[in-house]
Image (cartoon, rainbow, N blue to C red):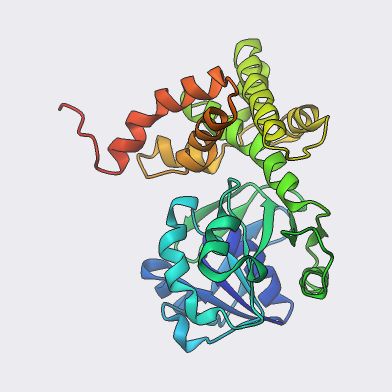
């Protein structure tokens, strides 16, 4: 299977690296220091499941040199999707399927608007990853997994082929019966995790142990559940309980990627993980006081990171 990975951070590096390690034909579209490191030293992955190095690596900043592929795994930040849509166009043949592995619920429709819904699937993954340095990523979650599925819930051959490729790579992979519900269920976990984490500047072990922050976390999760229901998305009735159980089983030092970006003063996925709930709740007539407060509290830092607001010296 020919696979292109657009975005070689923690997600793209780990899952693309596992595919490449198992012998799949994988091209990494990267740029800057990441591209230089991949070309010189290969892709290094540190993981609780075992470290590995892929070298040499097919890495480029010019997708035209790759050509059309079977699958594009899009693993950029949510706010980078518009730029990625243009960059990945040479990869998108008539039979190519794009699978976004992004936080949030809007990426499939963004890609569908550019390439047509029939050439896009939904996808999500779970791992606790970070970039150690260019070309070197780390995962601290045991047995990371990936889930994908057709947007119309059909079980087609291309999803089965992708699942088989991940099976050969030793990665847990599932085909979702309702990928849109799965995307909302992931947002229900990762959005409050990142939002409360960014507001408190605390790791998950602290957040879950304090009654006040645990209540805030559960309240934000419940709000996402209610917004999903209002939009006729069939999230599981026990989605909040499952998300809290995942919080309780997470490494106590774990932080979310959005939290780390905000704390470091970098642009983050605030709009895709917190702002989106505020916007869609408004459209659905649902009150979301937890998200409204989190969004308002974190927005100045986000605007500052983007150079839109200057703080006095």
- Whether residue 227 sits left or right of residue 42 in the image: it is right
User: Which residue in the rendered view is the most extreme toward the left?
Assistant: 313
Q: Is residue 75 visible?
A: yes
Residue 297, x across and y down, in percent: 41, 23
Query: Is 305 above or below relative to 64?
Result: above
Q: Quadrant of residue 161?
A: bottom right
Name the quadrant containing residue 299.
Answer: top left
Of 110 and 262, nearer the camera is: 110
In the picture shown, does residue 117 fall above or below 244?
below
Q: Residue at x 59, y 35 (%)?
A: 191
- Quarter occupied by the N terminus: bottom right
Q: Residue furthest top?
A: 212
User: At x 24% / y 40%, what residue is drawn?
Assistant: 308
Indicate the position of residue 207 as horizontal and vertical percent values.
Answer: 61, 22
**Quadrant of the image occupied by residue 123:** bottom right
Is residue 262 shown left or right of residue 49? left
User: Is there any visible trace of residue 52 in the rendered image?
Assistant: no
Could you say which is closer to the camera, residue 100 or residue 173? Answer: 100
Q: Is residue 153 above or below residue 63?
A: above
Identify which residue, 13 or 48, lies in the foreground: 13
Quadrant holding the C terminus:
top left
Give residue 224's position: percent from left, percent from top. 65, 30
> How many dots with numbers?
0
**In-image side of 90 versus 159 (left or right):** left
Question: Residue 78 at x, y = what percent?
Answer: 49, 51
């Amino acid at each position: 299977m020919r696979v292109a990975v657009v975005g070689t951070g923690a997600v793209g590096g780990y899952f693309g690296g596992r595919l490449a390690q198992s012998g799949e034909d994988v091209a990494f579209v990267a740029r800057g220091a990441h591209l230089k490191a991949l070309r010189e030293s290969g892709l290094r992955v540190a993981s609780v499941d075992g470290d590995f190095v892929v070298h040499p690596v097919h890495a480029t900043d010019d997708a035209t040199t790759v050509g059309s592929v079977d699958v594009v795994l899009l693993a950029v930040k949510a706010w980078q999707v518009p730029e990625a849509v243009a960059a990945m166009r040479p990869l998108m043949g008539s039979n190519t399927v794009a699978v976004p592995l992004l936080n949030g619920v809007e990426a499939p429709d963004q890609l569908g608007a550019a390439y047509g819904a029939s050439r896009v699937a939904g996808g999500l993954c779970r791992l606790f990853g970070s970039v150690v340095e260019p070309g070197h990523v780390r995962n601290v979650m045991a047995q990371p997994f990936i889930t994908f599925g057709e947007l119309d819930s059909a079980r087609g051959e291309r999803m089965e082929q992708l699942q088989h490729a991940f099976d050969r790579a030793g990665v847990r992979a599932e085909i979702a019966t309702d990928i849109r519900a799965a995307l909302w269920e992931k947002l229900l976990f990762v959005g409050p995790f990142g939002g409360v984490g960014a507001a408190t500047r605390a790791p998950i072990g602290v957040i879950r142990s304090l009654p006040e922050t645990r209540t805030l976390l559960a309240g934000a999760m419940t709000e996402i559940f209610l917004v999903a229901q209002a939009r006729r998305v069939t999230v599981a009735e026990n989605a909040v309980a499952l998300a809290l159980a995942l919080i309780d089983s997470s490494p106590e030092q774990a932080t979310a990627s959005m939290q780390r970006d905000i704390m470091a003063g970098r642009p983050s996925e605030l709009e895709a993980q917190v702002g989106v709930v505020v916007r869609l709740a408004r459209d659905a007539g649902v009150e979301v006081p937890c998200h409204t407060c989190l969004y308002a509290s974190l927005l100045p830092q986000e605007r500052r990171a983007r150079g839109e607001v200057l703080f006095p010296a």
